[in-house]
Image (cartoon, rainbow, N blue to C red):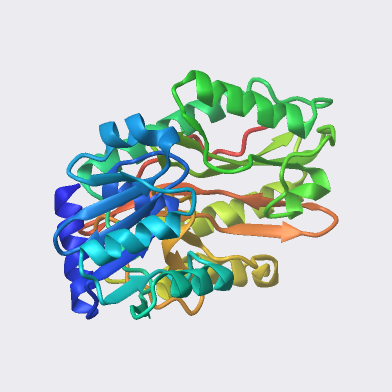
């Protein structure tokens, strides 16, 4: 944590400010180790201050080692003003993406005479490249997701609702040690599998249909994110052709993605295969995204993404084809970028399973 704070402060200081405030939950945890749901981190040259309320007095003191923990007043901005004065901050950085305009006006009113400077992605840029401990937690979360997929293939059958499948996945992951799910579990069957974010509904699974499962586990605050598509009953030639195309696109991306490549070039590795297969218009989302404390974070693997991939980044690779009135296929793995390519963190089978 201390090394992280020093790296963050180097970036903040280079921006010409003498203080910085973050309230983003992921950044708060990254800087202090605190896992509570409420708090603000004030970073200055002299020290790091965690402002939270009395509900978290014991927890914050135990988790935020090397940090000054301050219980804020009912109006937290009053306590912030006191700390800014104590630390003699004159130019104060804040995260424009983490506060509303109303909150900005309140911050401005609470700190008269202090210059407020918007600083975007001060912490997020550092979070992109994972430390060894972070890779360990993400890999553990990915293993839980892999095991959950193996389990759910024995549960899925015609007549079961999407919602029951989602519940079974979530309960299983909890029993395997997950702190929770990474996001609302997606179970989309039949025509609904053409919805990239088809959160589980009351629809009953039917024979001769795709079922797309997109889910993840949280472990030590870190997220995994995996997608697999199966079919119930004998697949048609159309089912098999679409699935084979998406798998071919994903395998090409996994084989060729590497550090130094832009997010745009990485996206094209899979997109070109799908376009050549005649389904370019049916792949509307990006190839992938960063993964860590947040389930969607930098970098982006997308058309027009200038993000440059680096060794140690963890990203998803998830091409898909979605055909209205028929269904869709998405196959997603979590990978870590290595010196000469990537290593998969998710290992669940990608054979087209007929359940």
* Count of marks placed on residues: 0
- Where residue 237 appears, as percent x and y from the top left, is 74, 48
Q: Camera-side residue: 270 or 297?
A: 297
Q: Camera-side residue: 126 or 230?
A: 126
279 is higher (above) or lower (below) than 42: below
- Where residue 119 appears, as percent x and y from the top left, is 35, 75
Q: Which residue is drawn at 14% across and 52% down?
A: 3
Q: In which quarter of the image is residue 232?
A: top right
174 is higher (above) or lower (below) than 45: above
Q: Residue at x 36, y 79 (%)?
A: 117
Whether residue 259 appears in this view of the structure is: no
18 is higher (above) or lower (below) than 346: below
Q: Camera-side residue: 100 or 89?
A: 89
Seen in the image, is 347 located left or right of residue 323?
A: left
- Where residue 114 appears, as percent x and y from the top left, is 33, 78
Seen in the image, is 164 located left or right of residue 334?
A: right
Q: Camera-side residue: 235 or 18?
A: 18
Location of the C terminus (image quadrant): top right
- Where residue 110 appears, as percent x and y from the top left, is 43, 69
């Amino acid at each position: 944590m201390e090394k992280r704070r020093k790296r963050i402060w180097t970036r903040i200081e280079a921006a010409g400010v003498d203080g910085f405030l973050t309230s983003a939950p992921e950044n708060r945890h990254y800087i202090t180790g605190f896992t509570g749901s409420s708090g603000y981190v004030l970073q200055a040259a002299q020290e790091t201050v965690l402002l939270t309320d009395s509900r978290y007095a014991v927890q914050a003191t135990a988790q935020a080692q090397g940090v000054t923990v301050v219980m804020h007043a009912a109006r937290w901005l009053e306590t912030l003003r006191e700390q800014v004065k104590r630390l003699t901050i004159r130019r104060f950085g804040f995260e424009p993406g983490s506060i509303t305009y109303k909150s900005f006006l309140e911050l401005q009113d609470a700190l008269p005479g202090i210059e407020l400077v918007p600083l975007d992605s001060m912490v997020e840029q550092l979070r992109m490249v994972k430390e060894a401990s972070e890779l360990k937690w993400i890999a553990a979360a990915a293993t839980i997701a892999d095991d959950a997929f193996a389990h759910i293939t024995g549960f899925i059958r015609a007549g079961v609702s999407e919602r029951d499948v989602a519940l079974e996945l979530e309960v299983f992951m909890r029993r395997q040690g997950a702190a929770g799910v990474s996001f609302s579990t997606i179970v989309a069957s039949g025509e609904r599998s053409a919805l990239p974010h088809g959160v589980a509904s009351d629809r009953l699974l039917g024979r001769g249909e795709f079922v797309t499962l997109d889910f993840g586990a949280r472990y030590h605050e870190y997220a995994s994110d995996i997608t697999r598509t199966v079919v119930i009953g004998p697949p048609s030639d159309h089912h098999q052709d679409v699935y084979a195309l998406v798998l071919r696109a994903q395998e090409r991306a996994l084989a060729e993605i590497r550090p130094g490549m832009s997010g745009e070039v990485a996206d094209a590795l899979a997109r070109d295969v799908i376009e050549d297969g005649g389904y370019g218009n049916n792949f509307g989302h990006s190839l992938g995204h960063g993964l860590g404390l947040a389930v969607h974070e930098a970098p982006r693997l997308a058309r027009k993404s200038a993000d440059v991939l680096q060794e140690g980044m963890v990203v998803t690779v998830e091409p898909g084809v979605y055909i209205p009135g028929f269904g869709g296929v998405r196959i997603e793995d979590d990978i870590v970028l290595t010196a000469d390519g990537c290593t998969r963190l998710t290992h669940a089978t990608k054979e087209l399973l007929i359940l």
